[in-house]
């Protein structure tokens, strides 16, 4: 089979697209049913009281029906029926255990949970926002939604959201364990007393300064590059590409970036506002969109600015480390944004990185990293 979206086996009308959507929709519906059945294990405690249950049940029903119908369509159109049959099986499994009307399971005491609801909610929300955006305003119109490498990136997206309790714990623990000595209650009280908008802006600056330093270290230190090159191995940029982050990369980057926020003691509402902002902004700057946003390019990181960070072009290697504020790169001499140009290719040179979440999880521990991109681009 040729590359996804271009081979005869995956083109429109072949049943492949309906098969993939069947599996996706049925899996979301079935996952929603399981969340209702086992809320103590599969849902995030802070989110449970916020869900509008009638709407949740309606969405679950819609996804199960859509998954079943698309599965039937794929079976009728496609010679290889595995995708369609899988979607049908998932939809039927969800229906057999009670479907959208299944009673909500009893809560139990549990020391841990899996954020299946968080994964499903974010997948649905980001897909609804960014897939139409990439279809209407594509940077590369020829790039299909299901481009090469998308299963790997979806795997990263799933794991990072399902293991949200673990990643949050590992993000906050280093600051609390190693930097408690730096906390000054008077300073924290003064910081938290500021207007929320001021705190939000201060969080953006403090977090991005820390992220810039950590990000630059991941490029400069060979052992850290072993993990970070996983992120740069994506050969295409879209809303899923930013999810390709090794667990070590996530823990160190988020953990160290959280230190100044912990020490300064920002109020919880300002921190939550920043988390919402960074969640959408991180996806947006990787997206396959052609927005220039010229009035804002000097103020905030745009897709074009960050795409150059992922460029295979040697002149762009080790540039544009900032995540939010391009002025940081300009201050430290690492900014690169040629007028009216986008990168021609993305990824890393040298030794290729195998696809698959599990393969990439163990890869940094098994063998040396590829040579720096500057030598192979």
Image (cartoon, rainbow, N blue to C red):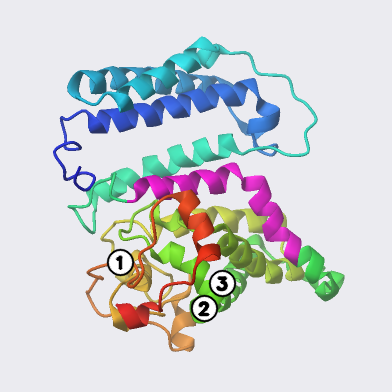
Residue at the image position 50 percent from the left and 73 percent from the top: 225
Q: Residue 288 at what x, y percent from top left?
A: 30, 56
Regarding mark 2 in the picture, which secondary structure is present there? helix
Regarding mark 3 in the picture, which secondary structure is present there? helix
Q: Nearer the viewer, residue 185 or 27?
A: 27
Magenta stretch containing residue 85, yes or no? no
| Location of residue 67 by image quarter | top left
Q: Residue 189 at what x, y percent from top left?
A: 81, 67
Regarding mark 1 in the picture, which secondary structure is present there? loop
Above or below: residue 245 compared with residue 301: above
Q: Quadrant of the N terminus?
A: top left
Mark 1–mark 2 Cα distance, whole angstroms, equals 20 Å
The residue stretch that appears in magenta = 149-174
Lateral position of residue 56 relative to residue 108, left or right = left
- In this view, the mark in front (3 or 2): 2
Residue at the image position 74 percent from the left and 70 percent from the top: 264
> Counting other residues with Cα less than 10 Å from the Cα at mark 2, is it few (<14), some (14-19), or many (20 or more)?
some
Residue at the image position 44 percent from the left and 89 percent from the top: 333
Lateral position of residue 66 relative to residue 368, left or right = left
Residues under numbered marks 3 and 2 in contact, where contact means CB atoms less than 8 Å apart: no
Mark 1–mark 3 Cα distance, whole angstroms, equals 22 Å
> Counting other residues with Cα less than 10 Å from the Cα at mark 3, is it few (<14), some (14-19), or many (20 or more)?
many
Q: Residue 55 at what x, y percent from top left?
A: 51, 23
Dot 1 or dot 3, earlier in sequence: 3
Q: Nearer the viewer, residue 285 or 142?
A: 142
Location of mark 3 (residue) = 211
Dot 3 or dot 2, earlier in sequence: 3
Which mark is drawn over residue 222?
2
Q: Quadrant of the C terminus?
A: bottom left
Location of mark 1 (residue) = 346
Q: Nearer the viewer, residue 301 or 101?
A: 101
């Amino acid at each position: 089979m040729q590359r996804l979206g271009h081979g005869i086996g995956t083109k429109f009308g072949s049943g492949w697209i309906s098969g993939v959507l069947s599996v996706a929709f049925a899996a979301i519906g079935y996952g929603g049913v399981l969340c209702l059945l086992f809320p103590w294990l599969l849902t995030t405690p802070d989110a449970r009281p916020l869900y509008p249950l009638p709407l949740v049940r309606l969405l679950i029903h819609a996804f199960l029906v859509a998954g079943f119908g698309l599965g039937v369509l794929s079976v009728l159109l496609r010679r290889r029926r595995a995708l369609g049959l899988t979607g049908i099986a998932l939809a039927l499994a969800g229906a057999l255990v009670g479907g959208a009307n299944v009673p909500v399971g009893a809560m139990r005491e549990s020391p841990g949970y899996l954020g299946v609801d968080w994964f499903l909610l974010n997948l649905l929300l980001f897909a609804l926002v960014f897939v139409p955006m990439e279809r209407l305003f594509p940077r590369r119109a020829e790039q299909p939604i299901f481009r090469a490498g998308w299963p790997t990136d979806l795997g990263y997206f799933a794991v990072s959201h399902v293991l949200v309790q673990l990643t949050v714990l590992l993000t906050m623990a280093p600051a609390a364990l190693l930097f408690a000595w730096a906390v000054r209650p008077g300073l924290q009280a003064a910081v938290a007393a500021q207007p929320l908008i001021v705190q939000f802006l201060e969080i953006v600056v403090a977090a991005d300064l820390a992220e810039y330093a950590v990000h630059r270290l991941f490029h400069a230190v060979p052992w850290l590059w072993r993990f970070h090159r996983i992120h740069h191995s994506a050969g295409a940029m879209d809303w899923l590409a930013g999810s390709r982050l090794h667990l070590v990369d996530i823990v160190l980057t988020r953990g160290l970036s959280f230190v100044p926020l912990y020490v300064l003691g920002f109020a919880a509402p300002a921190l939550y506002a920043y988390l919402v902002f960074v969640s959408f902004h991180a996806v947006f700057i990787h997206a396959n969109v052609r927005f220039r946003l010229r009035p804002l390019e000097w103020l905030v990181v745009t897709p074009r600015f960050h795409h150059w960070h992922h460029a295979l072009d040697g002149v762009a290697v080790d540039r544009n480390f900032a995540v939010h504020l391009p002025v940081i790169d300009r201050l430290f001499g690492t900014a690169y944004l040629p007028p009216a140009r986008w990168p021609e290719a993305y990824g890393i040179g040298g030794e290729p990185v195998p696809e698959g979440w599990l393969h990439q999880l163990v890869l940094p521990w098994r063998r040396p990293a590829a040579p720096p991109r500057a030598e192979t681009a």
